[in-house]
């Protein structure tokens, strides 16, 4: 487990935003990404009959739709112990393989930080 208090303040911010999105919307996951200019994009899981996206995929899509050219970091708050391959691929497509992905539990404690690799 990563000590959340030791996180960079900007990384702590995206974890907090992701946690808030999950709680506010009552969805399984919340996510936030930070683009190359420092803007953040926050999303929850999308589960429609015709469209299913994880929170992290939705946050990346929001960044792309808003004109982001790259990502500095991503965070997902989830019950899962890790970021899925599809989530890491979405982050990698926009941010590159070295983009950090912080995976936190519902309590906001960062469990692990991996790269989009």
Image: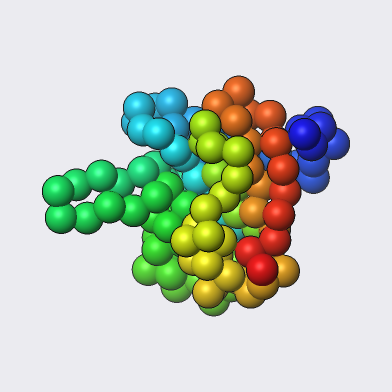
Residue 108 location, x and y as percent?
Answer: 63, 29
In the rendered image, which quarter contains the N terminus?
top right
Q: From this view, report whether residue 83 is shown above or below residue 24.
A: below
Given residues 70 and 78, the one toward you in this image is 78
Residue drawn at point x = 37 percent, y = 68 percent: 65
- Residue 90 shows in this picture: yes
Compared across the picture, whether 86 is left or right of 2 comes to left
Which residue, as the protein is rendered here, is positioned at the far right? 6
Q: What's the colour scheme?
A: rainbow
Quarter of the figure that contains the C terminus: bottom right
Q: Nearer the viewer, residue 101 or 65?
A: 101
Counting the numbered discs, the total is 0
Q: Is residue 26 left or right of residue 81?
A: left
In this rendering, would 100 be left or right of 85? right
| Residue 28 quadrant | top left
Is 117 left or right of 45, judged from the image as shown? right
Res 38 seen here: no
- Identified at 65% across, 54% down, the residue is 101
Q: Position of residue 93 (x, y in %)?
A: 53, 74
Return the residue found at the far left: 49
- In the rendered image, the residue lying farthest to the top is 107
| Residue beneath the point at 43% across and 26% down | 23
Q: Position of residue 87 (x, y in %)?
A: 50, 58
Image x and y of residue 99, in percent? 68, 64
């Amino acid at each position: 487990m990563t000590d959340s208090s030791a996180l960079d303040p900007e990384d702590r911010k995206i974890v907090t935003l992701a946690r808030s999105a999950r709680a506010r919307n009552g969805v399984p996951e919340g996510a936030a990404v930070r683009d190359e200019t420092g803007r953040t994009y926050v999303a929850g899981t999308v589960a429609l009959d015709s469209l299913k996206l994880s929170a992290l995929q939705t946050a990346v899509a929001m960044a792309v739709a808003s004109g982001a050219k790259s990502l500095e970091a991503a965070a997902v708050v989830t019950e899962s112990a890790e970021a899925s391959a599809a989530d890491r691929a979405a982050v990698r497509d926009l941010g590159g393989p070295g983009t950090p992905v912080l995976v936190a539990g519902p309590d906001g404690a960062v469990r692990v930080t991996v790269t989009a690799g």
